Amino acid sequence: MNKERQRKASGSLFGLAFGDALGADTEFMSVEQISAKYGPEGPSELQDNPARVTDDTQMTLAVGEALLAAEKPYSADTLEEPLRAAFIAWDRSPDNNRAPGNTCLQACEGLARNLPWQNATVISSKGCGANMRVAPAGLLRAEQDEVTPETRAAIAQFQAALTHGHPTALAASDLTTWCIADLVSGGEPEGLVERLQDYALSQRSVYHQLWLGPLWQIPLSNTPQEFIERGWDECLQVLERLDVALKQPDRQSDPCLQTGAGWIAEEAFATGLLCFLLYPEEPIKAIQRAATTSGDSDSIACLTGAFAGAHLGLEAWPQAWLDRIEYRDRLAKLGATWD
């Protein structure tokens, strides 16, 4: 069991980085342009040595390393400062030159000025930067990390809320985390969308007051429940689109046409998951499909890789890729933590 767990935690993190690296080369390109350059299946090899990733992997490392640094049991009080410090360090790093999102940059500037995080966050943003980095929360282990399913959900939403204050950013991050935790624990791809819908419905009115505090009041919602329900309702809508797409699987057309371009959180989740579920036992084909999209290809592919690795484990990926990916040592350390 420990060996299997190790492979899945490491597999998810490395899969995320591999998808990110493949998608980095195709972001801002049309499917026609990608096919003309790489062939109809899209990019099949990592470029350069090391193979460079984007801010998606960088911020995943920031979240993971903040989770390692925080005191346990986790709470908003113990996790805020490690997350704040990790996000500011990323913002100021000379490696932060990979076309980072404006929301993350703006929020990190506010965090660096020591604003309360509720004032630093971009309340109107539900960009995919909220959930492309959340995979480490899905790898937390109940006994080792002293987490319950409720705590894991709160962590997922809290890390999103520091930069992206929109309720859909919170809900999509929670949904992404639950999906990874389900796959790591042995959940099968078959029936996954239905399980996600059930989870979303169970959480629809749950506002994590101890973690999110007065965030719900900033956009002038009437109640905390009304605030968070907006986010879950948008996630349920995209899950319905995903369910429809999977009833007649189309491996040839651009997945973005079915579940969205992925610039926003719920669409990045759904389109990344669609690419995984089109090829649940073929992880490289899954991230190739995700990288051959007209939308936010690196974020879509990084989520696809995280799902595929959580399902199939580290052995799903080529050894040559493991040796060449940027930030290999940091990814390996996080993976080993949740072995």
Image (cartoon, grey):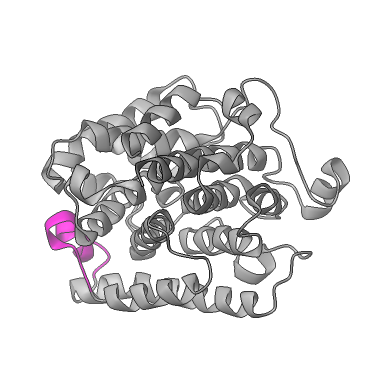
Q: Nearer the viewer, residue 196 or 318?
A: 318
Which residue is at a point 70% across and 37% down the rendered structure image? 25
200 sits left or right of 248 in the view:
left
Q: Nearer the viewer, residue 139 or 271?
A: 139
Residue 60 in percent (x, y) is at 41, 39
Quarter where residue 112 is shown: top left
Which residue is at a point 21% across and 61% down the rendered structure image? 150
Residue 289 in percent (x, y) is at 70, 54
Q: Is residue 91 above or below residue 101?
A: above
Query: Is 122 part of what is drawn in magenta?
Result: no
Q: Main secondary structure of the magenta part?
A: helix
213 sits left or right of 35 in the view:
left
Which residue is at a point 52% across and 79% down the rendered structure image? 240
Q: Is residue 136 above or below residue 176?
A: above
Q: Locate the C terminus by quadrant.
A: top left
Q: Is residue 303 above or below residue 243?
A: above
**Total of numbered circles in the picture?**
0
Residue 135 in percent (x, y) is at 40, 47
76 sits left or right of 94 in the view:
left
Query: Is 219 part of what is drawn in magenta?
Result: yes
Q: Nearer the viewer, residue 143 or 217?
A: 143
Which residue is at a point 27% across and 71% down the rendered structure image? 227
Q: Is residue 111 above or below residue 263?
A: above
Q: Nearer the viewer, residue 186 or 181?
A: 186
Q: Which residues are magenta?
A: 206-220
Residue 270 in percent (x, y) is at 53, 64
